[in-house]
Structure formats: structure tokens, C-alpha cells
Image: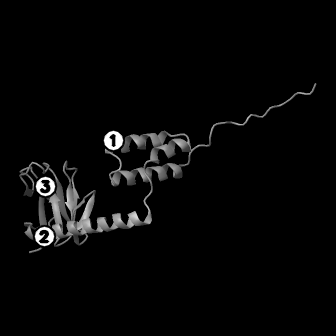
Amino acid sequence: MTPSFEFRTSSAPARLSDAERDRVLDVLREGAAEGKLSHDTFLRRMEIALVARTPDELGALTADLERRGRWSKAVFGAVGRVSGFSLSLRRAWQWERLPKLLFPAPGPGPLRIGRDPANGLRLNHESVSRLHAELVFQAGGWHLRDLGSTNGTCVNGRRVTGAVAVDHGDQVSFGQVAFRLATH
């Protein structure tokens, strides 16, 4: 009697690629940005996407989030540009009304900014940390660095992470306290 051999093929599907997961995560992010998903739903679906094992599981996460067509992309793009313009206009209007913060004479150390009385610039506001930020003259230019403040430091509306170069006319904010940098 001749021995018989059976070859069994595994019924388990192939492992999902990172590209497949990334595509689904992009669709979920887009859906959340458009307001189609609540924050909690977005987080729950992202968690499921990261542990999904089959393409069907991934597909179920985005089944109700249809990709936008060319027409809706144009409409959403136009709305975004109009919204961006109104924000720019509001910032420009506010910019002229901001108090000036004059650059100090360059010295050996930085100008520390915060609520603590030992700082060179004391800002007595609840949104400002005790040791909030520092302004330092390095390599021929001024740099602003956040010192781990709770409510953040922003330059021209963008939150500072690390040190960022600043110049005359820049809008800076420490928590909710804002200034316009000036040389005179």
C-alpha cells in the first residue's frame, strides 16, 4: 500500500499591509475632518483598524465614508479657501491692535517670559506659565523658545515646538496674551 499525502492549504488570509491600513486611516481622518465621524467614533475605528486582520474588517470601517467626487472636492476646497481668507482678514485686523513687544538689547542671556517675578518680562495672566518662554539673540537673529508651558507659545498663529526664528512684525502669544514684535 502506497502512503497518501494530503497537502492542506492554510485558510488564514495573508497579513494586511501597512499601506492598506494607512489608506483606511486616511479615509477615517478625512471623515472626521468633514464632520462625518464623532471624535469617539473616529478613535474607536482607528483602534479597530490597527488590530484588523482581514480586508473585510478594514472595509467595514469605511463603508459609510464614501470618497468625495471631483465636484464635492471643488466645493470643499472653495469653502476652505473662503474660511482661510476670513481668518487671515481677522488676524490682519487684530495685528494692528496688538500691543508692541520691543526686542531688548542683545545681552549675554535670554529674556525669560512668564508669571514668575524673576523673569525679565513678567506677564500676570492665568494662561501664562511661571516660566513660559524665552527670547534669545543667537547667530545674528532673535529666536523664541517655549519652555514647556501649559498653554503654549505661538508665532503668527502657529504653536512653537522647540526654537523658532522671529523678526519685526511677527505676532507672538504666550497663552492668551498676544503681542506684535517690534524693533522700535
| Residue pictured at 47% horizontal, 47% vertical | 63
Q: Quadrant of residue 15?
A: top right
Mark 3 or 1, nearer chain start: 1
Please rate how many residues cluster around mark 2, counting C-alpha atoms within 10 Å: few if below 14, some from 14 to 19, many from 20.
Answer: few
Q: At 28% from the left edge and 57% from the top edge, which residue is drawn?
A: 162
Q: Amino acid at mark 3?
A: Gln
Q: Name the mark nearer the viewer: 3 or 2.
A: 2
On the question of residue 7 being in view, the answer is yes
Callout 3 secondary element: loop
Q: How many marks?
A: 3
* Residue 142 in sight: no
- Residue occupying image coordinates x 9% and y 48%: 126
Location of mark 1 (residue)? 40
Q: Is residue 21 left or right of residue 14?
A: left
Q: Position of residue 55 (x, y in %)?
A: 55, 45
In the depicted structure, whether residue 4 falls above or below residue 167: above
Residue denoted by label 3: 176
Q: Amino acid at mark 1?
A: Asp
| Quarter occupied by the N terminus | top right
| Up-down relation of residue 129 to residue 168 (above or below) | above
Q: Please say if the residues under marks 3 and 2 sit with CB atoms less than 8 Å apart.
A: no
Q: Residue furthest top?
A: 1
Residue 49: percent from left, percent from top: 46, 43
Q: Earlier in the sequence, mark 3 or mark 2?
A: 2
For disc 3, the neighbor class at 10 Å (few under 14, some 14 to 19, many from 20) is few
Q: Which residue in the structure is indicated by mark 2?
A: 93
